[in-house]
Image (cartoon, helix red, strand yellow):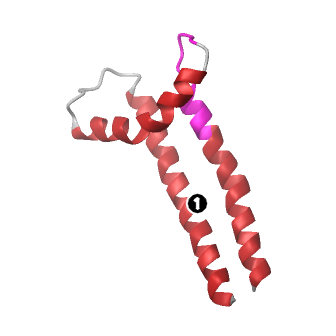
Protein backbone atom coordinates (compact mmCIF):
# COMPACT_ATOMS: atom_id res chain seq x y z
CA UNK A 1 0.00 0.00 0.00
CA UNK A 2 2.97 2.34 0.53
CA UNK A 3 3.63 2.30 -3.22
CA UNK A 4 0.17 3.72 -3.91
CA UNK A 5 0.71 6.30 -1.16
CA UNK A 6 3.99 7.40 -2.74
CA UNK A 7 2.32 7.53 -6.14
CA UNK A 8 -0.49 9.68 -4.77
CA UNK A 9 2.01 12.00 -3.09
CA UNK A 10 3.98 12.30 -6.35
CA UNK A 11 0.77 13.12 -8.25
CA UNK A 12 -0.04 15.83 -5.70
CA UNK A 13 3.47 17.25 -6.08
CA UNK A 14 3.21 17.18 -9.88
CA UNK A 15 -0.20 18.89 -9.86
CA UNK A 16 1.16 21.59 -7.58
CA UNK A 17 4.09 22.35 -9.90
CA UNK A 18 1.96 22.26 -13.06
CA UNK A 19 -0.52 24.67 -11.47
CA UNK A 20 2.33 26.92 -10.39
CA UNK A 21 3.79 26.97 -13.92
CA UNK A 22 0.38 27.64 -15.50
CA UNK A 23 -0.21 30.47 -13.04
CA UNK A 24 2.92 32.20 -14.30
CA UNK A 25 1.92 31.60 -17.92
CA UNK A 26 -1.42 33.32 -17.24
CA UNK A 27 0.29 36.21 -15.43
CA UNK A 28 2.79 36.71 -18.26
CA UNK A 29 0.01 36.56 -20.85
CA UNK A 30 -1.94 39.23 -18.92
CA UNK A 31 1.14 41.45 -18.77
CA UNK A 32 1.86 40.96 -22.47
CA UNK A 33 -1.71 41.91 -23.33
CA UNK A 34 -1.12 45.40 -21.88
CA UNK A 35 1.35 46.19 -24.66
CA UNK A 36 0.87 45.72 -28.36
CA UNK A 37 2.75 42.44 -28.93
CA UNK A 38 3.75 41.10 -32.30
CA UNK A 39 1.13 38.36 -32.96
CA UNK A 40 3.66 36.35 -34.99
CA UNK A 41 6.21 36.18 -32.18
CA UNK A 42 6.55 32.49 -31.14
CA UNK A 43 6.47 33.32 -27.44
CA UNK A 44 3.32 35.40 -27.79
CA UNK A 45 1.71 32.69 -29.89
CA UNK A 46 2.58 30.07 -27.24
CA UNK A 47 1.13 32.23 -24.47
CA UNK A 48 -2.11 32.73 -26.37
CA UNK A 49 -2.40 29.08 -27.40
CA UNK A 50 -1.74 27.87 -23.86
CA UNK A 51 -4.17 30.21 -22.12
CA UNK A 52 -6.97 30.93 -24.58
CA UNK A 53 -8.75 27.55 -24.17
CA UNK A 54 -9.11 28.30 -20.45
CA UNK A 55 -9.73 32.04 -20.64
CA UNK A 56 -12.27 32.08 -23.49
CA UNK A 57 -15.08 30.17 -21.69
CA UNK A 58 -14.60 32.30 -18.58
CA UNK A 59 -14.60 35.47 -20.66
CA UNK A 60 -17.91 34.46 -22.26
CA UNK A 61 -19.55 33.99 -18.85
CA UNK A 62 -18.32 37.25 -17.31
CA UNK A 63 -20.23 40.48 -17.93
CA UNK A 64 -18.77 42.69 -20.62
CA UNK A 65 -16.71 45.50 -19.10
CA UNK A 66 -13.71 47.46 -20.26
CA UNK A 67 -11.39 45.21 -18.25
CA UNK A 68 -10.84 41.51 -18.87
CA UNK A 69 -11.18 39.79 -15.49
CA UNK A 70 -10.79 36.25 -16.84
CA UNK A 71 -7.06 35.98 -15.91
CA UNK A 72 -7.94 36.95 -12.34
CA UNK A 73 -10.63 34.26 -12.20
CA UNK A 74 -8.16 31.66 -13.50
CA UNK A 75 -5.52 32.75 -10.97
CA UNK A 76 -8.04 32.47 -8.13
CA UNK A 77 -9.07 29.02 -9.35
CA UNK A 78 -5.42 27.94 -9.44
CA UNK A 79 -4.88 29.22 -5.90
CA UNK A 80 -7.97 27.35 -4.77
CA UNK A 81 -6.74 24.11 -6.33
CA UNK A 82 -3.30 24.56 -4.80
CA UNK A 83 -4.76 25.17 -1.34
CA UNK A 84 -7.51 22.53 -1.49
CA UNK A 85 -6.79 19.73 -3.97
CA UNK A 86 -3.06 19.32 -3.36
CA UNK A 87 -3.34 19.08 0.47
CA UNK A 88 -6.25 16.65 0.16
CA UNK A 89 -4.14 14.38 -2.04
CA UNK A 90 -1.18 14.70 0.32
CA UNK A 91 -3.37 13.85 3.33
CA UNK A 92 -4.81 10.86 1.50
CA UNK A 93 -1.28 9.67 0.73
CA UNK A 94 -0.33 10.13 4.39
CA UNK A 95 -3.41 8.16 5.53
CA UNK A 96 -2.44 5.23 3.28
CA UNK A 97 0.95 4.85 4.92
Q: Where is residue 9 in the image (x, y as percent from the top left)?
A: 64, 74
Secondary structure at badge 1 equals helix
Quarter that holds the C terminus: bottom right
Rendering quarter of residue 29: top left
Residue drawn at (59%, 31%) of the image: 72
Residue drawn at (38%, 30%) of the image: 32
Query: How many other residues sit within 10 Å of disc 1, few (<14), some (14-19) or many (≥20)?
Result: some
Q: Please report the bounds of the magenta region as a residue range.
A: 64-75
Q: Position of residue 84 (x, y in %)?
A: 73, 55
**Residue 72 is inside the magenta segment:** yes
Outermost left residue: 40
- Please say if 41 is above or below 87: above
Q: Position of residue 18 (x, y in %)?
A: 50, 57
Q: Name the residue under label 1.
A: 16
Residue drawn at (44%, 43%) of the image: 25
- Please say if 46 is above or below 18: above
Amino acid sequence: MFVFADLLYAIAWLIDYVLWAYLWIVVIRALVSWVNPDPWNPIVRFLYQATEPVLRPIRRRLPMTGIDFSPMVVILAIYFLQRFLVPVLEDAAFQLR
